[in-house]
Image: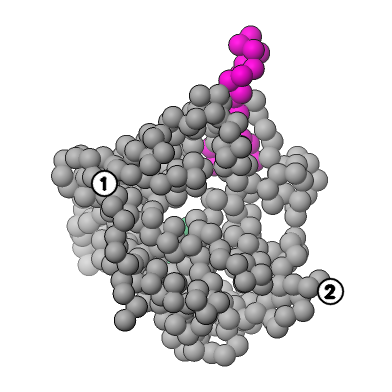
């Protein structure tokens, strides 16, 4: 038994059992097989439909199911609340759970609005002062190739970074007859491709460069303005695609483009970083590979070299398989849970924090404001935090 396993078993509740609920459940179920983490128990899975959530709980390894998240966060045997519900619920559940002394992992984006994000940061700060931890689920930070990319950039292997390109392209809305969902209504999703996938792209820009965005110029567009709803045709109130140019505080320039109507692109998160001494490229559809060009190599032999990020020396890989036995998209969630559990056990603050999630929201809000102003340059001025009083 290691020191991590001597403390009391942490009770976990997850809220939401669909896409992210399943991905997080898989991570909770497998993390202890691969990493040394504190003892925990998958206690309760929460949803709205009693029969459906009971079936999901059974399938995904949870001891119980429930339909009222408020009752669950009030339980003494729950220590961790993992929020896999849509964005409109993030602020309400996270602030209540933190106030009840529960550690909170919440899916991205942090929330649907700046006001909600600010309230969540205030709640996280109050909770942190009494040892309660919080984290926002930008899981791509825990793709080993991207963790390695950040390390190489921080070590100066690229020299001074001048440009970064981040695109995140999907095509699940390319069909005009695809039906309305909560993701296409502003009141439930906050925004469209912007909050859904530009949040990941912007987080990666800030994470890889260890820098923050100073100003933005952006544009949002909705190609399909009406879709079939439950009661007939319904207005789409969020963007299908977004584009932005970002100036980083450190002087680099980033371009971000995201779409849910890019025909043929399924889940293509692509990152390219160009420095004075080296360059890096990555595509999530080949998640084990990082391409690195060393600009100090003699020109005759210069070229992008493929690094297969499956060596035990690479971030997180020592928990998995022998070299070359590749891992997948879902492993980033396992790494996220592993790090969150270690933060709780060690009494350290997780990253990305709610403040970092708010930092992404500031950029998204500035892109929206820029788009509304015809693409004008908009600074991402730091907002005042909501007072705790
Ligand atoms: N990290 C990633 O790569 C990634 C990918 C997809 C979605 N997400 C994020 O995860 C979150 C959830 O998205 P999803 O794709 O899983 O959505 P989803 O529609 O597939 O699932 C939402 C779940 O929330 C549950 N829910 C809704 N209202 C509830 C309530 N009042 N009480 C309890 N449960 C409730 C639903 O029953 C459902 O199980 C969003 O914030 C989304 O942006 C992250």
| Label 1: few (<14), some (14–19) or many (≥20) C-alpha neighbours in 10 Å | some
Residue 35 in percent (x, y) is at 74, 62
Residue at 55% in and 50% down? 141
Give the residue at x 42% y 61%.
Answer: 355
Task: Give the camera-side residue of 208 and 61.
Answer: 208
The residues bearing labels 2 and 1 have C-alpha atoms spaced at a distance of: 52 Å
* Residue at left offset 66%, top offset 70%: 346
Residue matched to label 2:
1
At horizontal 26% and vertical 66% (from top left) the residue drawn is 187
Q: On screen, 47 above or below 112? A: below
Q: Secondary structure at mark 1?
A: strand
Q: Which span of residues is magenta-colored?
A: 283-304
Residue 185 seen in the current view: no
**Image quarter in which the N terminus is found:** bottom right
Determine if the magenta segment contains residue 285: yes
- How far across and how far down the image is residue 385, in percent? 32, 67
Is the residue 177 above or below the residue 248 in the image? below
Q: Residue furthest top?
A: 300
Decide if residue 238 is on the left or right side of residue 77.
Answer: left
Q: Nearer the viewer, residue 161 or 336?
A: 161
Q: Magenta span has 350?
A: no
Classify mark 1 as within 8 Å of ligand 1 or not, answering yes or no.
Answer: no
Residue bearing mark 1: 379
User: Which quadrant of the frame does ligand 1 lie within?
Assistant: bottom left
């Amino acid at each position: 038994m290691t020191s991590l396993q001597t403390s009391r078993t942490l009770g976990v509740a997850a809220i939401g059992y669909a896409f992210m609920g399943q991905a997080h459940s898989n991570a909770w179920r497998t993390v202890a097989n691969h990493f040394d983490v504190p003892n925990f128990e998958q206690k309760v899975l929460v949803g709205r439909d009693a029969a459906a959530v009971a079936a999901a709980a059974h399938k995904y390894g949870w001891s119980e199911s429930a339909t009222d998240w408020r009752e669950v966060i009030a339980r003494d045997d729950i220590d961790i609340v993992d929020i896999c519900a849509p964005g409109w619920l993030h602020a309400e559940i996270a602030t209540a759970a933190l106030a009840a002394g529960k550690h909170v992992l919440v899916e991205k984006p942090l929330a649907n609005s700046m006001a909600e994000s600010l309230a969540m940061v205030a709640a996280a700060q109050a909770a942190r002062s009494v040892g309660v931890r919080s984290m926002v689920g930008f899981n791509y930070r825990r793709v080993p190739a991207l963790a390695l990319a950040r390390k190489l950039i921080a070590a100066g292997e690229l020299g001074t970074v001048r440009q970064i390109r981040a695109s995140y392209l999907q095509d699940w809305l390319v069909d005009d007859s695809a039906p309305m969902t909560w993701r296409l209504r502003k009141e439930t999703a906050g925004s469209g491709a912007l909050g859904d996938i530009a949040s990941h792209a912007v987080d990666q820009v800030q994470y890889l460069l260890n820098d923050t965005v100073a100003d933005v110029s952006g544009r949002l567009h909705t190609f399909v303005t009406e879709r079939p709803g439950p009661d007939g045709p319904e207005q789409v109130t969020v963007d299908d695609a977004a584009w932005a140019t970002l100036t980083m505080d450190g002087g680099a320039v980033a371009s971000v483009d995201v779409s849910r109507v890019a025909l043929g692109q399924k889940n293509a998160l692509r990152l390219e970083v160009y420095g004075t001494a080296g360059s890096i490229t990555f595509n999530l559809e080949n998640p084990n590979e990082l391409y690195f060009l060393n600009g100090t190599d003699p020109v005759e032999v210069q070229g992008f070299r493929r690094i297969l990020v499956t060596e035990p020396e690479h971030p997180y890989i020592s928990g998995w398989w022998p070299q070359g036995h590749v891992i997948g998209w879902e492993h980033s969630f396992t790494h996220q849970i592993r790090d969150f559990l270690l933060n709780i056990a060690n009494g350290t603050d997780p990253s990305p924090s709610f403040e970092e999630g708010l930092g992404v929201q500031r950029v998204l809000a500035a892109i929206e404001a820029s788009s509304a102003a015809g693409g004008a340059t908009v600074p991402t001025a730091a907002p005042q935090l909501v007072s705790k009083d």
